[in-house]
């Protein structure tokens, strides 16, 4: 006797007994009466036992069939409970979630996502690594990397969260005591706060089809965006800053947006993870939250510019 459990056959038999009819069982299971009859006959042959007694007027269950029915109901109930439990676990975020991102973008943005996700997913714990080192997420066991900038080619999966857009900012105090600033060429007369680069700091500013290279030696060269913002707030010059970082200070009156429209190209931000096909619920949940909470979408729409045509940049020194 073949004792392999065929759940579809078992469900068919249970439906026939419960409904007392091949026709009604077929309707319940979305099939036809003849197929249900063949299934029951095949089961009886496999079990070497008669489960049902058929007549033109009546369908009855044998003693063996009654015993099989009761056991089958228990088995199907247990199987459905097991499937439901696994499905629930597959949907519920839990366990350790390891995240890495840049040393500045983490405290400025990702901290907020982590805090909200921990509140929404009480069974999740989080370990963050904020570093400017490019982390090998596969070999270092990291679940999600939030990366700012163009992605390198790899076999990893990625989901774009949004773009960081930029602008030029200075404090109202600095602008009151500095030369006029009516056009991009006037930057040569101003103190500039630039992100440190090698061989030397400069800005490549875009405004529609126009491009300007600002190669003037800065008043301050600094390797921290947060530091550049702080110096700009203190009135020490003009800094190029992410809009999400600067606009709250504009609202407070401690910074002003100068030369609107002129800025560096927007920079993409992606969530990078091992696989998009079998994502752990905690990974999927955190990535989905990151997409919905990305703080720069509104600012990106406000600063939409026409497509940039490639042309040689003018240089202001």
Image: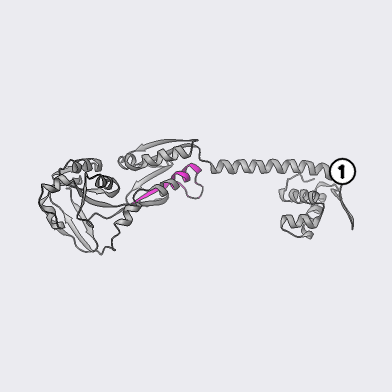
Q: Position of residue 67 (x, y in %)?
A: 82, 41
Residue for point 12% across, 48% down: 176
Q: How is the image coloured?
A: one colour
Q: Quadrant of the C terminus?
A: bottom left
Q: Is residue 217 part of the magenta span, yes or no?
A: no
304 with respect to 137 (left or right): left
Q: Which residues are magenta?
A: 268-287
**Is residue 230 in view?**
yes
Who's the residue at 22% across and 43% down the image?
229
The answer to whether 62 appears left or right of 288 in the picture is right
- The reply to whether the magenta stretch includes residue 275 is yes
- Which residue is under mark 1? 63
* Image location of residue 28, percent across then percent down: 73, 55
Residue at x 75%, y 43% (from the top left corner): 73
**Which secondary structure lies at badge 1?**
helix
Residue 237 seen in this snapshot: no
């Amino acid at each position: 006797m073949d004792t392999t459990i065929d759940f579809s056959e078992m469900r068919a038999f249970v439906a026939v007994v419960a409904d007392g009819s091949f026709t009604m069982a077929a309707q319940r299971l979305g099939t036809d009466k003849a197929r249900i009859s063949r299934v029951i006959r095949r089961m009886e042959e496999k079990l070497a036992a008669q489960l049902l007694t058929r007549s033109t007027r009546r369908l009855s269950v044998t003693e063996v069939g009654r015993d099989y029915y009761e056991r089958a109901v228990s088995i199907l109930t247990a199987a459905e409970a097991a499937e439901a439990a696994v499905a629930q676990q597959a949907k519920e975020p839990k366990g350790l979630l390891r995240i890495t991102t840049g040393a500045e973008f983490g405290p400025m943005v990702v901290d907020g996502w982590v805090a909200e996700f921990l509140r929404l997913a009480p069974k999740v714990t989080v370990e963050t690594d904020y570093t400017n080192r490019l982390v090998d997420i596969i070999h270092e066991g990291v679940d999600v990397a939030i990366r700012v900038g163009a992605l390198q080619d790899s076999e990893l999966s990625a989901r774009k969260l949004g773009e960081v857009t930029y602008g030029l900012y200075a404090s109202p105090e600095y602008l009151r005591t500095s030369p006029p600033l009516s056009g991009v060429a006037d930057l040569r007369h101003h103190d500039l706060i630039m992100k440190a680069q090698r061989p030397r700091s400069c800005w490549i500013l875009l405004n529609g089809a126009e491009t300007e290279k600002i190669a003037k030696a800065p008043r301050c060269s600094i390797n921290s965006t947060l530091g550049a913002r702080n110096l700009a707030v203190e009135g020490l010059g003009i800094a190029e800053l992410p809009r999400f970082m600067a606009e709250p200070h504009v609202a407070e009156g401690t910074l002003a947006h100068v030369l609107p429209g002129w800025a560096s190209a927007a920079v993409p931000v992606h969530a990078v993870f091992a696989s998009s096909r079998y994502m752990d619920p905690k990974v999927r949940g955190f990535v989905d939250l990151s997409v919905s909470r990305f703080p720069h979408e509104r600012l990106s729409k406000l600063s939409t510019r026409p497509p940039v045509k490639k042309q040689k940049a003018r240089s202001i020194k």
